Each structure stands twice: as structure tokens, then as C-alpha cells.
Amino acid sequence: MDDKECALRCLDGEQSAIRFFVERFHGPLFKLCWRRLRNREDAEDVTQESLVRALQYLRRWDPERPLAPWVIKIAMNCCSSHITKRNRQIQPVESLVEAPAKQCQAVTFELSEGLQMALSKIRDQHRTCFVLFHLQGLDIARIAEIMDCPKGTVKTWLHRARLDLGQLLVSQGVVSREGYEVH
């Protein structure tokens, strides 16, 4: 069953279509939420909230447009709301900076951890564009639609995200300056 048929059957209250909808979007939304929130429990909660909202507001979706970007946009909004709510709460200093328990010898793990840390330090719009483009595999047009901005803005944010991430990875010692050339 394709996305459009699934959505229309969900609107008719068909339970098998609702299960299909949840199974179809749960994995991609969880990955997106986890990358934005960097906390498994929060990502699980926000993924659930996103799916509930998508089903709740499915009547507002335009069947002439693709369903996936619409659902992703709901998840992005839920993540943003969660981040805002989380930032309003007072957090102890120990929870703001988490030191790794062990030194990892694997370069892949070190780069992954370095990238996650660097991603947490760049502007929200830049991080969102980077995650959607490089980690979710969406094209510029879809990202522009999801983020409700022009394609040129998405390209600029992607460029700035790459520059900022490269500089942060160098400053963290994850990559050498020789391996990264700032343009």
C-alpha cells in the first residue's frame, strides 16, 4: 500500500492502515528525533507524539502532496517544542557536559561521537538541514518544504553547517587541520 492509499484508509478509520502508517514512519521519525534530541528516551517520546499528531491532524494533509515530508515536518515541530521546553528547565552543570566513561580506540566511534558533539553545538536550523540532507537523505526541495523556507536558504544553512562542523571537529581534535581545509 502506498502512502496516499494508507492515509486515505486511516482517515476511514481502518485499523490495519493505522498500524501500517505507524510501522511505515516509526523508524525514520525515531532516527530523526534521536539525532535532533540526542537522548533515546526523549526521542521515543517525541516519536510517539509525532505519530499521534500526524494521525490526529491527517485531515489537514493535502492528498495532492507527498505524505512523508508532511509527517517529517510534524516530527521536526515536535522536536523543536521539546527542545524549547527542555531548555526552559534548569539543568545542573553535570548534565550539560557528559564526559565519556572510557577512551574508545575505534576511529569510527570517535568520529561519530565527535560529530554528535559538534552537531549539538551548531545552530538549530543548520543542524536540522544537515541531518535531513546527510543522514536522512532528503533533497534540498523536500528540506525547504519541511522547514518552510526557500531552497537557497537550505543551501546556505547546509554550507554553514559543514563549515561549522569541520571547524568544531578540528578544534575537538577529532580530525587534523591537514585533513580539513576551510573554504
Image: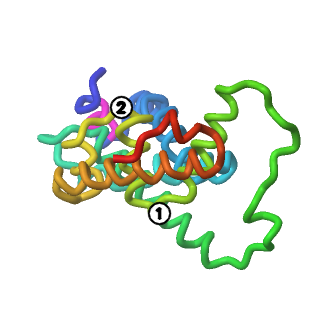
Quarter residue 109 falls in: top right
Provide the secondary structure element on which disc 2 rests: loop
Residue 73 visible at all: yes
> Counting other residues with Cα less than 10 Å from the Cα at mark 2, is it few (<14), some (14-19), or many (20 or more)?
few
Considering every residue shown, the one lying at the far right of the view is 101
Horizontal side, residue 103 vs residue 43: left or right? right
Q: Amino acid under label 2?
A: Gly
Q: Position of residue 132 (x, y in %)?
A: 38, 42
Quarter residue 98 falls in: bottom right
**Residue of label 1:** 80
The residue sitting at 16% across, 56% down in the picture is 150
**In the image shown, does 96 or 7 lie closer to the viewer?**
96
| Stretch of the chain drawn in magenta | 6-10
Which is closer to the viewer, label 2 or label 1? Answer: 2
Q: Amino acid under label 1?
A: Ser
**Residue of label 2:** 137
Does residue 7 show up magenta in the picture? yes
Does residue 11 show up magenta in the picture? no
Horizontal side, residue 132 vs residue 42: left or right? left
The residue sitting at 65% across, 26% down in the picture is 108
Above or below for 147 versus 18: below
Provide the secondary structure element on which disc 1 rests: helix
Above or below for 65 versus 128: above
Horizontal side, residue 168 vs residue 154: left or right? right
